[in-house]
Image: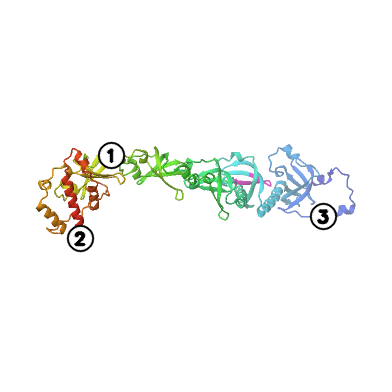
Amino acid sequence: MEDQATQTPVETGKEPQVFSMEQALQDAEARLEKTVQRGQIVTGTVVLITNDGVMVDIGARTEAIIPFNQLTEEPLSEEELKNLLKPGDSVTAYVVRADLENGQVVLSKKRAEADQSWVKVQALFDQGEPVMVEVKEKVKGGLVATIEGIRAFLPASQVDLKRTPELDEYVGQSFLVKIIELNRKKGRVILSRRTVLEAEQKAARSSILSSLKEGDVVEGQVVEVTEFGVFVALGGVDGLVHRSEITWGRFNHPKDVVHKGQTVKAKVLSVDTERERVNLSMKALTEDPWLTVSERYPIGSKLNGKVVGLTQFGAFVEVEPGLEGLIHISELSWTKRPKHPSEILKEGQEVEAQVLRIDPAERRLSLGLKQTQPDPWKSLPDRFPPGTPVKGKVTGLTDFGVFVEIEPGIEGLIHVSELAYERVEKPSELFKKGDEVEAAILQIDPVEQRISLSRKRLLTPPPQAVSVPGDEEGEGRKGRRDGKGGERPKRPKGKGGPREGRGRERDFDYGGSTGAAAYTNYDPNVAAASNTNVKLGDVFGDLLSQLSLEEDKDKEKA
């Protein structure tokens, strides 16, 4: 076979070369001296295509053969393999077996190509540069691609920035990857597309951060909505719109205002290039409603709003998005005194209120609900002049008097000195909550919302109170004025005592000068004209007694 192979003419398409005898001898000596070893990479020329393989002249004493199954990794037919090479082609192969004595040298073209590919892949791995690959198929746990003819594995966790459960769509695609692991002995090549994407993202992020500055208006897509805010994609970097910067209005969760995938515009508040953080504000692109609140809602004007919150001290009303006012619990009703605003208002209720106070600097708007309704206290002095008899139920008891409800939500105080002609130490011993009491109007203060009542003015006075003042009585009064006849016992201080049957305190003060004012404002003409048992002598007698007390106090001070 060797002789036949050496005598086969080589068709190169060129004119036959003429060798001299000397050159032939030198060539024969070189062939005899050349050694071939297993694992060596040799280059030769195809001389013949046989049924067993491709005969190659490698410059040794015998020709080598490349079996068809060692030509390529591609699944080709026998006819395609025979046409893969033709005589005269140069080929590089790997020496699989070398037995020159017996004239057997077996080569492998695909093994040589693999070795060369490994060399190239090793160079790519050492350089660390991305390389373009084409995905061939999907396997368990990832994808398979070829790089320089070598099968490489792309794990599912390295396909994209986030793990993708469906990998079928990547089959047939070509993209840049980076070799992250290489082991030639085990034939292992691990690729990563995620590393390339992260590097691209970092470069884009650095570029964007360097271009952004405070005050810029940017546009992006909402990529995530959380409890504390909204993340907006700005092309490589995500900006945060804190929940306080989404809108001027009130909301429970940011998802009530924006949703994932929505395109929004925002203003750049700050840029931190080191920490790669961008703070945005959506509400900065709209006008602050507090800037013009005084012009749009002057004091005294009425407005409509929705109750958005109830607290122990009042109700919050949303006038417009970003503008809320507070109706204090004391401004809910003229007559009712609720313990909680929920007794009058409900959350979500539409109400009309009046503007009481505005403080744009502190962003405070005080509203009043009762101001939109008639004030019953303004008409009380006309409907109940001094001396008018009234009936009502006892709503509370204190050491200094009895509270009586003369109209729904309107109470008056019968001072302890006006309960009866005789001395009353404890009103609770005579009355209890719910008792019906008759009394006469002494004074009404609509501003302070106070009503002074007298029960004893409707009672029949004792005989000594109706007798004509004589010498004895005059001397007694004179003695009291001069400090004679014994001192008048002082009343125990009960003004600050607890009020029985009432959960709250009223700041009534009917002792001292207030009592004198009550008597001073008493109109005897009106009282005489009414159908009551109030006598003019009683009024003046009480006035004189009061004056004597005032004089005693002045002397004590002196």
Q: How crowded is mark 3: few (under 14 residues within 10 Å), some or many (20 or more)?
A: some
Q: Residues within 10 Å of mark 2 (few under 14, many from 20)?
A: few
Quarter of the figure with residue 262:
top right
Quarter occupied by the N terminus: top right
Whole-angstrom CA distance, mark 3 to mark 1, is 141 Å
Number of numbered callouts drawn: 3
- Magenta stretch, residue numbers: 145-155
Helix, strand or loop for disc 3: helix
Residue 26 in the figure: left or right of residue 310: right
For label 1, the residue is: 382
Q: Which residue is painted at 68% across and 46% down in the image?
A: 149
Q: Of marks 3 and 2, which one's residue comes earlier in the chain? A: 3
Q: Position of residue 527 (x, y in %)?
A: 20, 41
Q: In this view, does 272 lie above or below 365?
A: below
Q: Which of 366 and 242 is in front in this view?
A: 366
Residue 510 visible in the shown view: no
Q: Of marks 3 and 1, which one's residue comes earlier in the chain? A: 3
Residue 219 visible in the shown view: yes
Whole-angstrom CA distance, mark 2 to mark 1, is 40 Å
For label 3, the residue is: 30
Kind of residue sitting beneath label 2: Lys
| Closer mark to the observer between disc 3 and disc 1 | 1
For label 2, the residue is: 555
Residue 19 in the figure: left or right of residue 52: right
Q: Where is residue 52 in the image (x, y as percent from the top left)?
A: 74, 41
Kind of residue sitting beneath label 3: Ala
Q: Residue 17 carries which label?
A: none
Pointer 3 and pointer 2: residues touching (CB < 8 Å)?
A: no
